[in-house]
Image: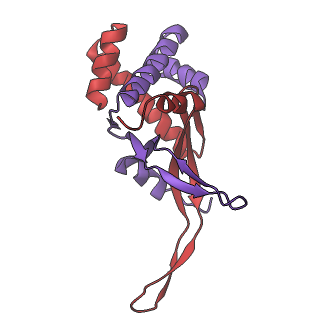
Chain colours: A purple, B red
């Protein structure tokens, strides 16, 4: 499912126009991006938690030249599904 | 930020009532959950991709009793931020 399909499904279920649903999805994406950029954690009941975590700096060694290189600290976005959402996959067989 | 704060911010920006914004957020969460349960990948421009991946079965050994145990295959939900969202964190210093 992509943005367009989510927008279509949302309009169908709630009776919004395509234009309104498009604006809504775009606003949610911007709000979430802004919050994360401000270093805030997003925690949505029934879905999960998004958090920006800092990966520490580390030293790599080029195996050919043996040159050591310092990789600077990096910010990465992590996601952890909520227990309720995780539970849904538990009940789905992994063999399917 | 939690559900309630997202709903508040959404109403403020787009002029929806709290009730409508609550319904919208709940619908998006259900739609996403349903799609993922159906084994579909969610790919939202500007935000990222959610995908249910299968972790293979593996054998663990209890270090005390030496007993071998088969851990069954498991479905887990993964998230990968979009390049555009990743880029936002690159420009934020990790030293802050």
Give the answer, above or below, for where A23 lies relative to A80.
above
Query: Does the image show residue A64?
Result: yes
Quick one: which residue is furthest to the bottom in this view? B65
| Residue A95 found in image quarter | bottom right
Q: In what quadrant of the picture does the N terminus of chain B appear?
A: top left
Q: Please name the residue shown 69% across and 62% down the image.
A: A63
Horizontal arrangement in the rendering, residue A49 relative to residue B86 (left or right): left
Q: In what quadrant of the picture does the C terminus of chain B appear?
A: top left
Residue B10 spot, x, y in % from top left: 34, 17
Give the answer, above or below, for where A51 lies relative to A88.
above
**Number of marks:** 0
Residue B68 spot, x, y in % from top left: 50, 86
Query: Does the image show residue A47?
Result: no
Give the answer, above or below, for where B22 lies relative to A96.
above
Q: Nearer the viewer, residue B37 or A73?
A: A73
Horizontal arrangement in the rendering, residue A72 relative to residue A1 (left or right): left
Q: Please name the residue shown 33% across and 36% down the image.
A: A41
Residue A2 spot, x, y in % from top left: 60, 29
Q: Nearer the viewer, residue A55 or B42?
A: A55
Q: Please name the residue shown 35% across and 10% down the image.
A: B13
Q: Nearer the viewer, residue A35 or B92?
A: B92
Q: Please name the residue shown 38% across and 38% down the image.
A: B95
Residue B61 spot, x, y in % from top left: 48, 84
Give the answer, above or below, for where A87 lies relative to A12.
below
């Amino acid at each position: 499912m992509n943005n367009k399909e989510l927008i279509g499904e949302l309009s169908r279920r709630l009776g919004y126009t395509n234009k309104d649903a498009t604006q809504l999805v775009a606003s949610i994406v911007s709000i979430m991006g802004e919050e994360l950029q401000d270093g805030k954690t997003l925690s949505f009941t029934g879905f999960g938690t998004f958090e920006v975590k800092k990966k520490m700096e580390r030293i790599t060694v080029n195996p050919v030249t043996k040159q050591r290189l310092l990789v600077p600290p990096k910010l990465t976005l992590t996601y952890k599904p909520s227990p309720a959402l995780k539970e849904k996959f538990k009940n789905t067989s992994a063999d399917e």
